[in-house]
Amino acid sequence: MKSINKVAIILTVIFASGIFIFAAKNPTEEKDVIKEISTNFPVKFDFAGEETPLKISDVKERMDRELLINVNLHASTILAIKRANRAFPVMEPILKKNGIPDDFKYLAVIESGLVNAVSPAGARGVWQFMPDTAKERGMEVNENVDQRYDLEKSTQAACSYLLNAKAKFGSWTLAAASYNGGMTGVNRQIDIQKVTNYYDLLLTEETARYVFRILALKEIMQNPVKYGFAIAPEDLYESLPTRKITIDSSITDLAGFAKSQGINYKILKIHNPWLRETKLINETGKTYQIEIPLKGY
């Protein structure tokens, strides 16, 4: 214990999104970052071009809270920055093609940390779709194939949802909030409270924090050095080049298939996480694209 005291490491335990995250940081560095936030709190935030009304006292306080919390989630924030280098180039052109503001990529960051996460409720993938919602948005979801784990297809499905939400609410901020609270839930509160602005609504704690968390990650990830996250380019996770194979029949042995392509089963599954079993069942002649990496193995 004495040696730990000498190096003066602070162990911070923060509860966020149902997960305990442990992070250690030099107290001097931590104090400098907190001072940076306190003295240089951004004078303006916006989500998808919709300005955050910091003149409202509780709005500014809530923004400050999420910025401070996420700056101190050292491990998860560093991992998000590293993963973004791999995930954002896939997501950005799909968002752009669908007319979805680029800021929505940060929604995926707070949903999953840019990994194929599994929630206790059963939501899966980077965009955290529930099974029924995924199927409604055109994704195949069963024990053999689960396209919620396909980043391209799930991003397209998220765009479909968000376009509908924007048409319903007339606001990208409310569309984002509804991704967490549901269109029905947000609309019910609009009717009850007789206001049509996210920042004027009293919502459940999770939905009330949701957009602020997105804004905090956007601010930190766009200005990582300012907030103490100086990560060298070579330490970012790279997007590996792949070749795609079109499959329209069953594959009875994915391990054998992987070997025939010059890789192993593990590498095949890493690059095609939507394949959920040791085989691909395809009795109807559906077309699937299997990605084979050209390096990194």
Image (tube, rainbow, N blue to C red):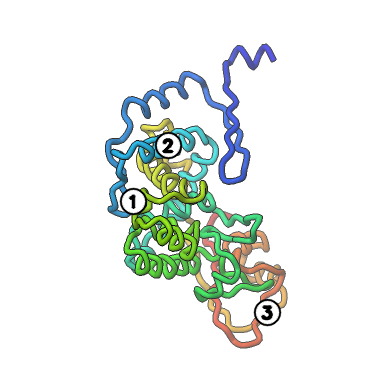
Quadrant housing residue 265? bottom right
Residue at point 27%, 36% (across, down): 43
Residue at point 52%, 22% (across, down): 26
| Mark toward the viewer: 1 or 3 | 1
Residue at point 57%, 16% (across, down): 8
Q: Quadrant of the C terminus?
A: bottom right
Q: Check disc 3 and report its element: helix, strand or loop.
A: loop
On the image, the x and y values in percent for residue 11 come to 60, 25
On the image, the x and y values in percent for residue 183 come to 46, 64
In terms of depth relative to the viewer, which is nearer, 284 or 133? 133
In the image, what residue type sits under mark 1? Phe
Residue at point 39%, 58% (across, down): 174
In terms of depth relative to the viewer, which is nearer, 105 or 202? 202
Q: Are marks 1 and 2 in contact (CB under 8 Å)?
A: no
Q: Which residue is mark 3?
A: 281
Give the CA distance from mark 1 to mark 2.
15 Å
Q: Check disc 2 and report its element: helix, strand or loop.
A: helix
Q: Is residue 103 left or right of residue 242?
A: left
In the image, what residue type sits under mark 2? Leu
Q: Which residue is mark 1?
A: 47
Q: Which residue is mark 2?
A: 67
Which badge, 1 or 3, comes first in the chain's sequence?
Answer: 1
On the image, the x and y values in percent for residue 204 come to 51, 50
